[in-house]
Image: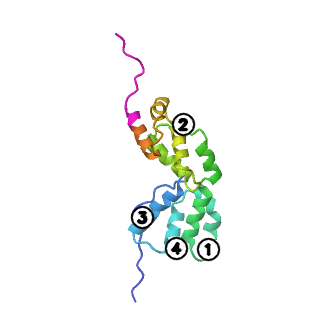
Amino acid sequence: MEPPQVYRVSRKLPPFWADKPAVWFAQAESQFALAHITSDATKFHYIVANLDSRYAAEVDDIITNPPTTGTYKKLKNQLINRLSLSEEQRVRKLLGREELGDRKPSQFLRHLRSLASDIGIKPRLLRSLLLQRLRLHVQAILQGQSTLEPDQMADMADRIMDVPLLTSMPSV
């Protein structure tokens, strides 16, 4: 009988992303797939070994007393559930005055969409939320484009913002 094969993740996982734990786990699972890791226990221990202490403390009940089966899945689901924004928090953030900042409008739209996931926000409301947070000169240009879908509007806003804004008018 052949001894079982042991695989190791050849690359170090990036630091845990508390603001996007589901995306971080997708990256970790890609690393596991590349390294041919399928063992639940190996995945569990690799994640535990790579968690910063403040995030490990969030799931210390699972780390110190792991379930007999499905340890990785339990750890993953609990980290995502415990660290992700609640639906109420996402709605508040979505409807609050979060600013565009240095993001492109298309990037900001993706951010708004991630907040709106599973809430059931209609595209028209998402479009309106994006439009409210654009710079005034971009809002003025896009206001009349009511038939644009949110993605089209964000792409157009990206192009408008690429044009330098004149701060003073040349005089003769």
Q: Are marks 4 and 2 in contact (CB under 8 Å)?
A: no
Residue 133 within the magenta-colored segment of the rendering: no
The residue lying at 46 percent from left, 56 percent from top is: 14
> Within the image, what quadrant is residue 86 found in?
bottom right
Q: SS for tag 1?
A: loop
Residue 126 in view (yes/no)? yes
Q: Which residue is mark 2?
A: 132
The residue lying at 55 percent from left, 50 percent from top is: 122
The amino acid type found where label 4 is placed reads: Ala
Q: Which residue is mark 3?
A: 31
Q: Magenta residues, as a range?
A: 159-172
Q: Main secondary structure of the magenta part?
A: loop
Q: Work out whether 54 lies above or below 3.
A: above
- Specify the quadrant that holds the C terminus: top left
Could you tell me residue 64's position as x and y percent? 63, 68
Could you tell me residue 102's position as x and y percent? 46, 37
Q: SS for tag 4?
A: helix
Tell me which numbered mark, 1 or 2, is placed earlier along the sequence: 1
10 Å neighbourhood of mark 4: few (<14), some, or many (≥20)? some
The residue lying at 57 percent from left, 72 percent from top is: 71
Q: Which residue is mark 4?
A: 41
Q: SS for tag 3?
A: helix
Q: Disc 3 to disc 4, how far (Cα)? A: 15 Å
Tell me which numbered mark, 3 or 4, is placed earlier along the sequence: 3
Could you tell me residue 140's position as x and y percent? 48, 30
Q: Work out whether 105 lies above or below 23.
A: above
The amino acid type found where label 1 is placed reads: Pro
Q: Which mark lies nearer to you, 3 or 2?
A: 2
Residue 166 within the magenta-colored segment of the rendering: yes
Tell me which numbered mark, 3 or 1, is placed earlier along the sequence: 3
- Image disc number at residue 67: 1
